[in-house]
Image (spheres, rainbow, N blue to C red):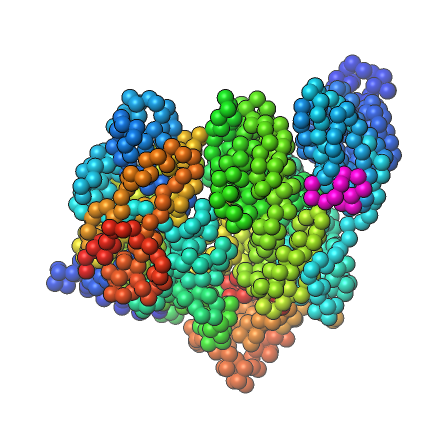
Amino acid sequence: MKRREFIKMSALTALFLTVGGSLTPAHAATSIASKTVVNITLDGGPDFKHLIVPPFDTDAQSYGGAYWRARASIFRTKAGDVTKLRQAYIDNYDEVTFDGMRFGILKSCTWLKNEIRSGNVAIVNNVVASTNRNHYHSKLIMESGSLRTGSNETDISGWGGRSVTELDANVVAVTRGVRLVCNGPDALRGYNNKRVISNYDSRNMGLYLYDTQADLESGSRNYIWSTQAIISRSLRGYYGAKAAEIPQNSPYRKFITQERQLRQFGDQLKVRLKGVPIPAAIKALYEGSSPLESPYFGKQVRNLYDSFATQDILSMRFASMEYTGWDSHREQHRSLEAKFGDLFGTNKGLHTLITALNRLNSNIYNNTVFVISGEFGRQLKSNGDYGTDHGRGNSMLVIGKRVNGGFYGDPFPAEDIDRLEIKNEDIVGKTSMFQVFAKVLDWQEKGLGSRVFDLNNQPIEPGVYLSRMLQA
Amino acid sequence: MIDFIAPILAAVITTSGGTAAMQEQQAISKIVAYADSSANPKPTLQDYTYANVDGVNKTNVNAYNRLVDSLEAADVDSAAERAALHTYFITINPLEDIVKTEYFAPFTLRPTVKYGGKDTLRFYLENSNEGLIDASVNAKGVISIGSTGNGSGTGVSHLRLIAFTGTQASNQTFSVTVNTMNSGSMAFTPLDFTVVSDELWDETAVRKVLYTFAYGGHATDEQIRTWAAMPPERAIVQMLTLEPKNKLLSPSGYNLPNTTSLERLAKFWNKISYVKAKNRDRFTTTPRSWGTPTASWMMAVLSRGLNPFVHRIGLWETNYHMSVSQVSGVYPLPMLSHYDTIMKKLSENSSYEQVMAQGAKNAAVAYQYGHNRNIFKDGVFRGNEDFAREYYQLFFGILGDYDHEYHEATTIPNTARALTDMQASWHPEEEGGPERKVTFGTEKHYSGDVEILHTTVSGYRADIKIDAIAMEAIEHEESLRNLPVMIIRHFADDSPTAAVIEHAQNSWAMMPVKRLLPFLWAYAVSTDFHSSTRIKYASSIDRMMTTMNLLTIDNEENGYMFYYPSWELSKEDVRVFSPAHAVFGHQTGVEASDNGNIFRVNYNRSAGAPWIYTRYYECERDQKDECRKDSSGNVIAVWEKRWRSKIPANAQGKYIVEEVALWLWKRFIADGGKHYGALERAHLIALLNGKDLALFLDKENPMKTYTKAQITGNSGIKRLLNDGAIAPMDLKSNDTKKRREADYRVNLAIAFIAATPYIYAQEGR
């Protein structure tokens, strides 16, 4: 962007922020907040059965009794030590009754507890995507949204990428890399990233270009000999001309697309974000002594906040976040408590983000749904290393103001009581994860879910009505 | 080099006095020093004689040196240990050793380990030359002798496991007599690939192989032409070798240690003078030297005089295939051991299952997965199944598709039992840090047979079972199907066609002993590799290492660590030995190519902070830390980049812009000029003339963009470019200022090339 253009845009933004006093940075940024899906992938097989548990029960034949005995080792307690098991429950969980269900929720997740009580959380149980316990393959299946995806099939589209293609919008990846879920469809190459904006460093998006115009105006000769001036002008000119030369189906085309995207959005974001300071609470999540175990998640929160602040520029309708390290074979309680806390604790990741977004524009949370899931669940019984090994079925969460909170599917099915004690048994998947994703997309646009997913033969647990999960 | 030589010598002087004693002590010091670092002089036959090491003769002295080289100084600094050298050498360790036979057959091995009960003892007897082996076992109660996978234990044509079962209740000693082992040479075979024709095997094809497998290598242009002129099957065995040094691939006047060990190399660079003092601390080897594995690996790749192919393989094995992570708490010394032991197995030309078994036995892997706490006690297994699953999936490519229910209910739980009593413990730094090796116990090991993959494996310790499982897994249908595809996908082909996959699978399957090197040889000269449909996107590591490697001229630059890529990679959020996906491996090329943020960082590296490319001297500094200048006003350099040592002058002994531009493109892009079009040519001509294209063509319009049509169609522009193309470059000028300007312009051009789309991917043709 030329300096004059930049100044002009800055002035316009400044005008937005000051004239009439009615437009805050938030209004300027998100006055057209669109229905948006934020997909948070928890890599490694998150044990949602550790997040929400049945209350301890002395009756070994009850679900609560059998569960706590089967998982005693996670709390370094013996299955027969009823007193300690009860204490473990009391020490680590807050008891909640909601939607006719009494359950415990990890004490580190107080924000989530409050959101559940506020009716903003759908807890969908007994969901399944993959039919195996292989991390890699299961992730491919979950993110592509197809059971037909092979174990090494990576040249494929993801359900997020397909949805924004249908919506004629963009995916914003606030992660280090671009996850498969973001990939758009491409008949020739299997997938493409035309609609994916990588916004991992939201405050530094854009490509460097020496300000030659400033030198020309000031009479400086630096633009002639400056190394940065020479190379940055060379590259800008080269890519500018090259865009017309590289065919659309060339393997090198994606770099032309990235260059254009960065040049197109970089300057606009810079101008817009100049008037939108990073909230201190968000900055604290990733800078210095972050309260999060994963400052990386804190950085994603910053990137997502900025993406919402520039949503109109980015045409964002789907955002991709991630949190890794859920493969809790050992020391599950210690590791998962911290991770769930990062996501769901008061003043932690999502709470801080949503608080800041509400200040930016209260309309955002009203128009945003967070979908939180992992590639598979864990086995019902804990292992001998204070953790759990791979399973298949799991739970997932859908969070948002438009969510009709409650339990979708029985979290503590009676038929599992006998299986809890058996090594290698896992949650029986009764509802396809794809059905849940599809309902979220239907909320974005009627019929979108069935255009993105092939829902034939994708089960829903009897008695579960996912169509009630979201309000229009 | 080692601080214990001095006391030994001092002791000699004060206590021995006599010549013989002096000779003995000097010989001992030499052996100890050689064990410490192979950069020290090799002991001679006479040294071993003086040091009273039995069994050494002129035939096997080199073998003894190899043995000493594989040990630590502390392993040979006592008389007892040196006396044990002979025993060590002729004693087979049934748990893990490979017996090299080229020096000793016929010979008899008398292991110190006893067997009893119904133990099945398994050990490897290997002739590295793929010759015939004829061996017999002499022990009471032996009821069977055989091998796994390939015929019987006697007269097999490929060296394999020998196993025998005893029935005696009490412990028995045994011996193995090796009657004959025929030698042969490790020969190239195309396997199921088709060797590319001599016509297609040209300089570009050679560069593509080097680019893919050796970060571009360090070979001279002349050597590349020589390889291109050779039949591909002959050239490839010279290009890609697993020895610590490859003089053709990486010629050098420097005497570097003859080792693939990053730890030994770190110790060398920690003290050697050409590494500048301020940089030597990067190579400390303390328990908390977190940066050392990365620094050593990068230096190993960039160092002229070693073998960049070996360390390209090392990255695959430790950051992708048998991946462990410092972020997950794997400390530096266990990490180095993980790398070093795997590379040692590879450099010994071990079978691939032995390489993987070695990885599985390493402490780093145990810390990563936590099975160092797995025990079997009081009839109960306590532990986790993490590595029990991933040993199959990640190492061998067995996902359980053969029978998911069986895999989940039988193979994985039983393997978890097999992985019991593998002790490796964390200790604070003052106590030496985390243990670097696993101690394999028997007390808490599940000693019974275990059923895995529909077969039964035995062994009274975990390491024996790990070996046995490897023997089964490598021949498993799923591994045969997936492992070769994993390999070619990683190195060279993001989307192999069905035909390429079939060729790779068939090739792997037809190798009676699976070895990585011959497989890569066959693939690297195949029509599949040199196909125009092949595309491989570069990971951040591959792109940066290749670019920095080709930017490097000599080890002097390495000593300054100008092109140390770690910092640059961290801007792309990539850290070697801390894989992006932990055990599932590091960032792939496809991931990097789809990531606009990585494109941004790399683009801005060239456009906004190009110093890593454009630096062309290191100046002598005064007390104010400012560069000194000579009487002509030129900075006094302690080091200068002189591209004339790499870029060939033309037949007239001159450097011409057009020729330099194309040479640079071919060096850094390795496409033979395929993508060196009108735009690339125009921009490089301008940069080699010291300007950007817009300024070069019209100084009044520095912001103007020129299209291909304008460049090729406008006669005025064409004339200006042609004038620029034939301009001489002062790369060998005696005028310091002119010469430096010329070298700077070359660097400008490289900074440009490093940000073009073509730096991000390689095509087969």
Quadrant for the N terminus of chain B, please. Answer: top right
Residue drawn at (61%, 44%) of the image: B473
Taking depth in this image into account, of A180 and A6 the one nearest to the observer is A180
Q: Position of residue A174 (x, y in %)?
A: 36, 54
Taking depth in this image into account, of B629 and A146 the one nearest to the observer is A146
Report if residue B84 lies within the magenta region. Answer: no
Taking depth in this image into account, of B242 and A295 the one nearest to the observer is B242
Q: Is residue B340 visible?
A: no
Taking depth in this image into account, of A235 and B134 the one nearest to the observer is B134
| Tag count | 0
Residue drawn at (78%, 31%) of the image: B137
Farthest-out residue, top: B15
Q: Position of residue B450 (x, y in %)?
A: 58, 34
In the depicted structure, whether residue B541 falls above or below residue B225? above
In the depicted structure, whether residue A356 falls above or below residue B745? above
Residue bounds of the magenta highlight: B148-158
Give the main secondary structure of the magenta stretch: loop
Q: Position of residue A436 (x, y in %)?
A: 30, 54
Report if residue B155 lies within the magenta region. Answer: yes
Residue drawn at (74%, 44%) of the image: B151
In the depicted structure, whether residue B201 falls above or below residue B96? below
Quadrant for the C terminus of chain B, please. Answer: bottom right
In the depicted structure, whether residue B688 falls above or below residue B72? below
Residue drawn at (51%, 27%) of the image: B375
Q: Position of residue B373 (x, y in %)?
A: 50, 28
Q: Is residue A54 visible?
A: yes
For residue A169, side relative to residue A184 (left or right):
left
Q: Within the image, what quadrant is residue B648 found in? A: bottom right
For residue B247, side relative to residue B294 (left or right):
right
Q: Within the image, what quadrant is residue B132 found in? A: top right
For residue A349, side relative to residue B486 (left or right):
left
For residue B413, side relative to residue A62 (left or right):
right
